[in-house]
Image (spheres, rainbow, N blue to C red):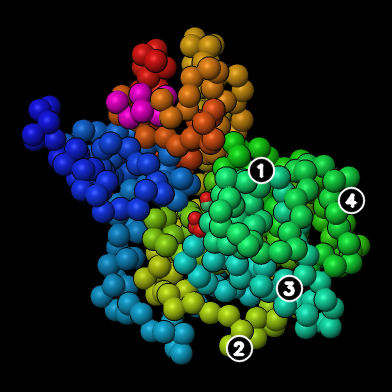
Amino acid sequence: MNKDNDNNIELKGIYEQVMMPNYAPADFIPDRALGSKVWDKNNKEYIDLGGGIAVNSLGHSNPILINELNEQANKLWHTSNYLANEPAINLAKKLTDLTFAEKVYFSNSGSEANEAAIKIARKFHYDRGEKREELISFENSFHGRSLLNVSLGGSENHKKGFGPLVSGVKHAKYNDINSVESLITNKTAAIIIEPVQGEAGVFEVDKDFLKSLRELCDENETLLIMDEVQSGIGRMGHLFGYMKYDIEPDILTSAKGLGGGIPIGATLTKNDIAPSLSTGTHGSTFGGNPIACAVANKVIQIVSDPTFLNEVQQKEELIMGSLSDIAIKTKAFSDMRSSGLWICCDIKQIDAFDLLNKCYENGLILVTAGNKALRFAPALNISEDEIQQGLDSLTKALNQI
Ligand code: PLP
């Protein structure tokens, strides 16, 4: 392609001029997509095994979701929180029917869902007359980019220069109960944990550790918050990750895959905790938007089907089997981990972003985890053909680098 008629380059040039430099996107610009296929401005085809970082749970332009979106768009777009709306009520009903939770608060993103969770936890203790403000999160965790969430997160790079941060946060070692025991006090309001540390490279929580963590929270009257923003909505082969272990959180946060690509966040809790978010104490202009909730209702209906969740686990096995073959042939990976359709390959020697660019050249979209690992979080309804096509492109990329 000659540079003068390269539509990607032209648009990317404008991007550089007008967008803040906080992201470093690929040189191609997606134009349209269907299922797990994406076409760029030059009509080049890609297989999407990144799934918009675990967001496009039912693939791109899913006709069933488009139908829900259109039907709702023709009825009611926005009401303000002075008025309730039917899709939000139905979605909260579904989420409470299907989980440990009895009450739901809607927002627009994972960061906002976590913000609400922490506010509820601190306020819960305050309402009981206890001054418990401290929070425990984990090293290498990721909870979002608001000031609260970077304070909770484990990355120094995300905090540098943005201080003062939210005070009262301590970081324990993931899967190390002694480390949590050494930090918990009668001032600890809540512990927030991801069932799988996704951004860190798909590291799953140890079942016994999680059980001990639950017990420790109960003994200390500390609330256990599970950040299921990335792990929830079928990603781990369960509707929510906590369902894989024999424990329940006090508060759970969801976003990403919940809207299948339409922005929505949700904070779920029990009847004894929810009253702390009393009228007027918290809110969001767009939270509980009828269009987002209508789409999320359909996503939940499809993903919560046990047959669908079983298929997620089967596809995990299929991808892991093929990746093991690729690892033997190319000797490119030093380790591989998976939890449902959420997979990470640690790569030897090569920089992850160089490999990612090679994948793009070969028509494959993936994401990284740091600069030493490739992450897969494809649509949960991806077909076997699309998986095969994507992995063939990965093999080509690895052979070329
Ligand atoms: N929590 C977890 C575990 C996440 O993976 C993310 C995003 O990657 C967030 C929170 C933040 O979500 P959002 O980017 O929607 O604010």
Kind of residue at badge 3: Arg
Q: Are marks 1 and 4 in contact (CB under 8 Å)?
A: no
Q: CA distance from mark 3 to mark 2?
A: 16 Å
Q: Residues within 10 Å of mark 3 (few under 14, many from 20)?
A: many
Disc 3: which residue: 122
How far is mark 3 from mark 4, CA to CA?
21 Å
In the rendered image, the quadrant that contains the N terminus is top left
Q: Could you tell which of marks 3 and 2 lies nearer the N-terminus?
A: 3
- Which numbered disc flags the more N-terminal residue, 3 or 4? 3
Q: Is residue 114 above or below residue 27?
A: below
- Note whether 341 is above or below 110 in the view shown: above
User: Which residue in the protein does label 1 denote?
Assistant: 140
Residue visible at 8% across and 34% down?
4
Amino acid at dot 1: Asn
Are circles 2 and 1 on residues that touch, CB within 8 Å?
no
- Do residues under tags 4 and 2 come within 8 Å of each other at their CB atoms? no
- Side of 179 where 374 appears, left or right: left
Q: Magenta span covers which residues?
A: 355-361
Left or right: 59 as drawn, with respect to 33: right
- 145 or 59: nearer the eye? 145
| Label 1 packing within 10 angstroms: few (<14), some (14-19), many (20+) | many
- Say which amino acid is labelled 4: Ser
Task: State whether the magenta stretch is mostly helix, strand or loop.
Answer: helix
**Answer yes or no: do the residues labelled 3 and 4 have beta carbons within 8 Å?**
no
The mark that comes first in sequence, 4 or 2, is 4
> Of 386 and 336, which appears nearest the observer?
336
Provide the residue designation for mark 2.
Answer: 279
